[in-house]
Image: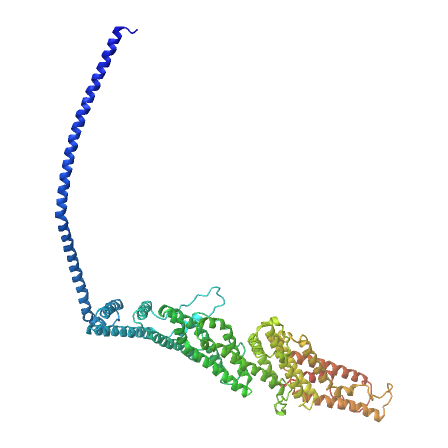
Amino acid sequence: MIPTEDASARKRKIEEKLKQEQETLSFIRENLEKSDQLTKGMVSILSSFESRLMQLENSIIPVHKQTENLQRLQENVDKTLSCMDHVISYYHVAKDTDRIIREGPTGRLDEYLACIAKIQKAVEYFQDNNPDSPELNTVKARFEKGKELLEAEFRSLLTRYSKPVPPILILDAISVDEELEVQEEVVLEHLPEAVLQDIICIAGWLVEYGRNQDFMNVYFQIRSNQLDRSIKGLKDHFRKNSASSGILYSPAVQTKRKDTPTKKAPKRPGKDDVLDIEIDSYIHCISAFVKLAQSEYALLTEIIPEHHQKKTFDSLIQEALDNLMLEGDNIVSAARRAIMRHDYSAVLTIFPILRHLKMNKSEFDATLQGTAASTKNKLPTLITSMETIGAKALEEFADSIKNDPDKEYNMPKDGTVHELTSNAILFLQQLLDFHETAGAMLASQVLGDTYNIPLDPRETSSASSYTSDFNKRLLSAYICKVLGNLQLNLLSKSKVYEDSALSAIFLHNNYNYILKSLEKSELIQLVTVTQKRAETSYRELIEQQIDTYQRSWLKVTEHLTDRNMPVFQPGTKLKDKERQVIKDKFKGFNDGLEELCKIQKGWAIPDKEQRDFIRQAQKKIVSDAYRAFLHRCANISFTKNPEKYHKYRPEEVEEMIEKLFDTSA
């Protein structure tokens, strides 16, 4: 049971707490009432505001729309005014540009092109908006006039500034100094840079806006003329300088000449120097054409549209190329006429030219890449013509050596080297300078069968393309054929001589000349490609002729032999018949010696080494036999006048023989 005091205290606490809760509840109720009042007030305000906003909107929107319409109208007015100004400007273009168009583009190309652009826009406007207006015809005419003057300016600039390239500059550009590892390229500047830029600008405009291709014809005609004049100027340079000072080459760069003969053909008085100049000139003009054409193409690519470049270039080079090919054809024709006259040395003019053409063919072909087939075929056609006429000349030359007539009046009286031999060897020596060209020339005519040269399938890639080794063997076989024909002809000619000894001297001289010439010119290396024993064979032939010649002395030395010599004892008196035998031997020797020395003194052996060798050999043979004979007759009394028969001492006999083959003695 809880005590009464505690219960009272607890009750009071509960009553106090209850009172506090009641007070809090009253406060909340009051606040809720206030909040309701405020909410009602806010709702009333918002309702009023919404109503006012709606009224404002209904008033403002019409005003706003009206303002927008006004702004749009203002913009339309501005645009209309602007368009009117723009349109009106087109009607004034002709008048505004009249002075500039009339005065032309010279010296103010940019300003002129700006005027043309205005006119072009006016043309486009009237075509689109008022095609029937007279103004369209006016601006069209002005545009055509402007285009015409631009074309005229293009022609004028090209004509005024296109000059032939000076010969000295061309020679510098094509010359090669073998001592320099890196060649300094000579730049050929055809037009001043400022002029070039104007020409490029005009060409670009004519293509893009002028719809005009006539300027390309103007371009190739003017540049074609300059290209041709440049090459002709180089020719004139050769002629003038060679006539006055002999200087043919640019002093700026020394040219190593590989393509001109190192030995001259048999002289044709008055013609050789001129001919050499013509050959040098043509060779350099070929190189000049390639270099100039390359330079022209580089210039052309800056001015002419890409899809017209090859065609324009083809047209541009035609005149110069045709002139070069015509000159080449004339050289071939001249060689053909010379062959008909049996002047085979003239064909040698073709060799340096042909070698140069073939050496430069790849660069030539690369330069003409993209041109018409007829243009590309011009050089191969000329090469073929030269190879054909050259091969014909070689064949006919070989036949002429074989068939040269044995005319007595044409034979050297002293048995020296025949003109046929010297000419044949000189011709072959000059072939050596162009051995690759000559071999390829023979191969091009499929003459391998003629010389029985076996052809390995690996040695050719086509019917007309043989290896250098095959060409070398073919040329070797040809040279051996010529030498064989020459040997047969010399043998035939030697029979013209009535004296077999002179015939032997003649053959000896010619064989020796051939051998020495082969050795000196290195022809022997080429000959031995197909005839390994060629050198030995000639030495054997020379020895045979020396033996034949020495047999001519038998009619002298036969008197010194023991044949018919009387057998006697020392102190025994000879019979008249025996004495006469000895007298006859002395007389036969003396007469024979005098006769041979008189005859053979007028014969010739040009080779000093051979002349001395034959003299020494003959001196030994004769003097040894004579000394032996004198020794046998030393104690024989066969005459009262020994000096009548013993006319010469051995030393005198040797002196007489020493004077053989000496036409100056």
Picture layout, residue 72 above or below residue 387: above
Quarter-wise, where is residue 497 in the image?
bottom right
Q: How is the image coloured?
A: rainbow
Q: Residue at x 18, y 63 (%)?
A: 83
x, y (%) of residue 545? 70, 83
Q: Nearer the viewer, residue 71 or 367?
A: 71
Q: Quadrant of the C terminus?
A: bottom right
Residue ranking furthest to the bottom: 576
Picture layout, residue 388 above or below residue 192: below
Q: Quadrant of the N terminus?
A: top left
x, y (%) of residue 609? 65, 78
Residue ranking furthest to the front: 1
- Is residue 183 at least partly visible in the picture? yes
x, y (%) of residue 616? 70, 80
Q: Is residue 573 left or right of residue 594?
A: right
x, y (%) of residue 378? 47, 78
- Is residue 513 at least partly visible in the picture? no
Q: Residue at x 61, y 70 (%)?
A: 458
Q: Residue at x 84, y 88 (%)?
A: 566
